[in-house]
Amino acid sequence: MRARSLLLLALCAASAAAQSVKIRPEVLTHELEHPWAIAFIGNDRMLVTERPGRMRVVEADGKLGAPLDGVPKVEVGGQGGLHDLVTDRDFAHNRALYFCYVEPGTSSGTSTIAMASAHLPEDAKRLEQVKVLFRAKPQVRGNLNFGCRIVDNGDGTLFLSVGDRFTHQDDAQKLDSDFGKIVRIRKDGSIPPDNPFLNRKSALPEIWSYGHRNPQGMTLGPDGKLWIDEHGPQGGDEINRPEAGKNYGWPVITYGENYGGGKIGEGISAKEGMEQPLHYWTPSIAPSGMAFLLNDKYGKAWKGSLFVGSLKFRYLDRIELRDNKVVKEEKLLQDRKQRIRDVRVGRDGLIYVLTDEEKGELIRLRPE
Ligand SMILES: [Ca+2]
């Protein structure tokens, strides 16, 4: 009897905890084809990328605009196409945007990851002054593991995540390749004078950190540091806080294994000189966009939480951290069974989510 009441109490406590913040998902549009990223371009307007190479305005009431003119040619196929989009920190004054995409290579069948800047006029009908700031080296075939998230670091530089392209996993440990790296450049495309490998012979000067696999989520934390999530192989998806010049281990150390089983390399998960992840998921959740909620629109319980989309298990993960350790995870939007591609906090302080489907949705989470 006593055990039963204790169990009941525990169950009540668990469900009370799960329902501590009730949210009402408000679908603004379900007419987006594989949307990838949201940028807030006004108090009541958003700009969204669709992987097949389009950018479109979504009004606060969900009204969808025509595709913008001026988007460069994008190589669409597999996981690749048009990916991340961010506004400049000073967007209200300079109307500057940064976006990344898969660009056709110079020889047939090859491609690479490019990052460009553009000016968005007030009417938001087209991109102007498009300038390619960076192209990842080398150009190769294949359409997997592009990475392709951007962060405006606030010091005049941009971070870009570049995946290992799947076929080039060993490049993640090589400093003469951009694959498996976080790169850092200035907003005019030049190299910042304090990047970590400027004095290393044969190292690419844009490299910030290395040993990454496929980072599809990236944001600045409340600590002002860069936070990323990255896909492991089978198991071993990670959260990292990439610091200048550090090695995050892939493919030498990993908590994952090869698809279908079998160890990767020596099958080790730790090695001197290589950083441990802040957190890892086994089995893989296939993490996507990430955002910190720093306001209390959803009450105190969610303030400070990190939100990460799961493509594979189709939920929004709410992560509580203490001293940079994950102390709790809560699965949200599970009943909707949608691949979550991006999560951002809007100018209104609310959480917005994109679902990566043929009829992809833009969802605003209303606290109740
Ligand atoms: Ca790692």
Image (cartoon, rainbow, N blue to C red):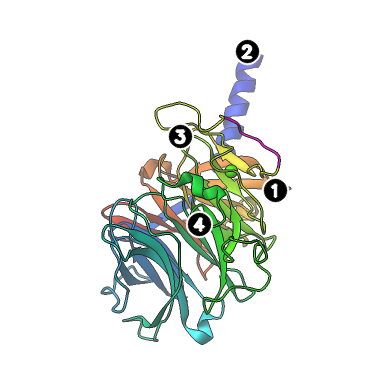
Q: Identify residue type, mark 4.
A: Ser
- The residues bearing labels 1 and 2 have C-alpha atoms spaced at a distance of 40 Å
Residue identifier under label 1: 324
Q: Residues within 10 Å of mark 4 (few under 14, many from 20)?
A: many
Q: Residues within 10 Å of mark 1 (few under 14, many from 20)?
A: few
Residue identifier under label 2: 1
* For residue 105, above or below residue 7: below
Q: Identify residue type, mark 2.
A: Met
- Whether pointer 1 and pointer 2 mark residues with C-beta atoms closer than 8 Å, the reply is no
Residue drawn where x is 32% and y is 73% of the image: 72
Give the number of marks.
4
Q: Nearer the viewer, mark 1 or mark 3?
A: 3
Q: Earlier in the sequence, mark 4 or mark 2?
A: 2
Residue identifier under label 3: 234
Secondary structure, mark 2, is loop
Quadrant housing the N terminus: top right
Q: Identify residue type, mark 3.
A: Gln
Residue identifier under label 4: 177
* For residue 246, above or below residue 260: below
Q: Identify residue type, mark 1.
A: Asn
Q: Which mark is residue 97?
A: none
Q: Earlier in the sequence, mark 1 or mark 2?
A: 2
Quarter-wise, where is residue 129 in the image?
Answer: bottom left
Principal secondary structure, stretch drawn in magenta: loop
The quarter of the rendering in which ligand 1 is drawn is: top right
Residue that lies at the very extreme toward the right in this rendered image: 323
Q: Position of residue 71 (x, y in %)?
A: 32, 74
Query: Which region of the structure is painted magenta?
Result: 267-272
Q: Nearer the viewer, mark 3 or mark 2?
A: 3
Secondary structure, mark 4, is loop
Residue drawn where x is 55% and y is 35% of the image: 15
- The residues bearing labels 1 and 3 have C-alpha atoms spaced at a distance of 25 Å
